[in-house]
């Protein structure tokens, strides 16, 4: 059965009230800085292009970024490429390859990649001043821009994935393509490849006022947990993993750690995932995991529609410990989402996660391998047995997110970058 993807209002603009609400969280000074930075960019035609309107971290960020930038006076727009399922199978192989999974991308797929990008070229706004393309799927659009249009525009590529440097020949495919861009943006200084394109770093962010992260009344949290069949949280504390069903998210490690913990402490594990229209692996990995947990008591797997933001918010608020034992991770918005809700998060020590978690202070880091299973089990037990420590760790987590991983900081970085790229400011973007 075809999945129904929810409609996202691509023309939304945040209201004055919404902007004022951000000021109550980050302070008036921070908002004034955004107004000041946006002033010379008023009316700038900024087009962002990715491959999914809903599902996954990039869509999550764009859903808030675009209406925010419009409210600041930019003529920001958001388009999504479409293609046949073979295109997304190919680009997911490419994505996995770039993250270091050894499987050779085939030539037929390469042809579908170019055909799909060519067919999508009509999406590109020829009147755009800046085109910001996200991830490998639509990166090929740049090849089809007529020269006279390309000369007037700046093209930026933003890479959200954990670039692994193990497979240089695949990186070469991306390298030659990305070198046509004016600038490439990465989520961590660790991923910068030695390519002939100026690099910069902008850290991702979460929106504290989105359905995913806004405050929820405790009764609503309890109701949602009850509706999805979770047991009483005071009887069985909840361990939670929220992630697409993807080979790099560490679901199997979470299950193994849970089995160890449950031998000693009563608890329940919930793993929530969902589909993204550009990720074809979901169903197969979900089925594998179902098989793996079918005889395990106190484990629930939920495959939710991609707009289940309130439900995920509720589960994150209900959890005693949040797990994100990724094996590769571009950033891991789920880590910041959990920390924002004052939860201790245990994350894989990989990619963008250590940029968010200071081990032992505002969360825990564990090895992104089988070695991490025992480490994770030990830390879960410690947190369940020491709720005061867990609460304090959670508070420090929220503070870290407030200082570094909210949307206002993300927009500030993007506005500054736009000013520099358009040469409204002197100097070239420096690494964050
Ligand atoms: N997410 C969701 N539903 C799911 C799984 C994930 O809404 O079933 C959200 C999650 O809350 C987060 C984003 O998708 O906001 C995932 O971003 P992250 O950077 O953690 O991982 P990505 O999917 O981009 O690799």
Image: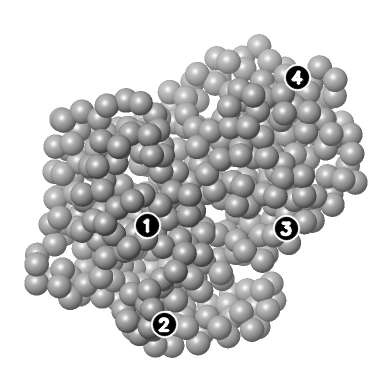
**Mark earlier in primary sequence (2, 1):** 2
Residues tagged 2 and 4 counted as in contact (Cβ below 8 A): no
The residue tagged 2 is 73
Say which residue appears at 25% left-offset and 30% top-offset.
Answer: 105
Q: Residue furthest top?
A: 295
Judging by the rendered image, the residue that carries numbered circle 4 is 260
The alpha-carbon separation of the residues under discs 2 and 3 comes to: 30 Å
Separation (CA) of disc 2 from disc 1: 22 Å
For this view, does 307 lie left or right of residue 151?
A: right
Residue at (47% x, 29% y) in the render? 247
For this view, does 157 lie left or right of residue 361?
Answer: left
Q: Quadrant of residue 252?
A: top right
Q: Which mark is residue 158?
A: 1
Give the label, 2 or 1, closer to the camera.
1
The answer to whether the residues at label 2 and label 3 have Cβ atoms under 8 Å apart is no
Q: Real-space Cα distance between discs 3 and 4?
A: 28 Å
Residue 398, numbered circle? 3
Residue 165 in the image: state x and y as whole percent. Answer: 38, 39
Q: Earlier in the sequence, mark 4 or mark 1?
A: 1
Tell me which numbered mark, 2 or 3, is placed earlier along the sequence: 2
């Amino acid at each position: 059965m075809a999945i129904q993807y929810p409609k996202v209002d691509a023309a939304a603009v945040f209201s004055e009230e919404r902007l004022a609400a951000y000021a109550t969280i980050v302070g008036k000074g921070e908002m004034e800085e955004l107004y000041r930075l946006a002033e010379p960019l008023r009316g700038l035609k900024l087009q962002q292009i990715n491959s999914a309107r809903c599902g996954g971290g990039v869509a999550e960020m764009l859903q808030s970024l675009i209406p925010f930038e419009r409210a600041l006076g930019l003529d920001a727009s958001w388009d999504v490429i479409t293609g046949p399922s073979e295109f997304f199978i190919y680009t997911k192989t490419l994505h996995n390859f770039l993250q270091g999974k050894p499987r050779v991308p085939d030539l037929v797929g390469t042809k579908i990649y170019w055909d799909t990008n060519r067919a999508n070229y009509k999406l590109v706004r020829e009147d755009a001043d800046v085109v910001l393309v996200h991830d490998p799927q639509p990166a090929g659009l740049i090849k089809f821009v007529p020269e006279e249009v390309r000369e007037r525009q700046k093209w930026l590529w933003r890479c959200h994935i954990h670039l692994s440097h193990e497979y240089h020949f695949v990186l070469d495919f991306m390298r030659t393509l990305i070198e046509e861009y004016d600038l490439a943006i990465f989520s961590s200084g660790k991923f910068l490849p030695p390519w002939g394109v100026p690099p910069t770093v902008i850290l991702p962010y979460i929106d504290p006022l989105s359905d995913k992260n806004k405050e929820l009344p405790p009764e609503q949290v309890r109701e949602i947990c009850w509706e999805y069949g979770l047991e009483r949280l005071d009887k069985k504390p909840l361990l939670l993993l929220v992630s697409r069903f993807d080979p790099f998210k560490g679901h199997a490690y979470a299950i193994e750690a849970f089995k160890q913990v449950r031998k000693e402490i009563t608890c329940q594990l919930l793993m929530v995932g969902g589909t993204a229209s550009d990720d074809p692996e979901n169903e197969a990995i979900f089925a594998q995991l179902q098989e793996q947990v079918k005889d395990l008591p106190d484990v629930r797997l939920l495959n939710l529609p991609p707009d289940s933001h309130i439900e995920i918010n509720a589960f994150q608020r209900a959890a005693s410990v949040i797990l994100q034992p990724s094996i590769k991770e571009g950033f891991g918005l789920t880590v910041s989402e959990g920390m924002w809700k004052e939860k201790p998060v245990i994350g894989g020590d990989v990619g963008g996660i250590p940029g968010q978690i200071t081990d032992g202070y505002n969360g825990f880091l564990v090895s992104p391998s089988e070695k991490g299973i025992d480490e994770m089990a030990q830390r879960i037990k410690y947190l369940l047995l020491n709720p005061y420590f867990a609460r304090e760790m959670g508070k420090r987590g929220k503070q870290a997110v407030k200082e570094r991983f909210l949307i206002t900081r993300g927009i500030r970085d993007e506005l500054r970058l736009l000013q520099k790229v358009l040469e409204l400011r002197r100097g070239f973007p420096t690494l964050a």
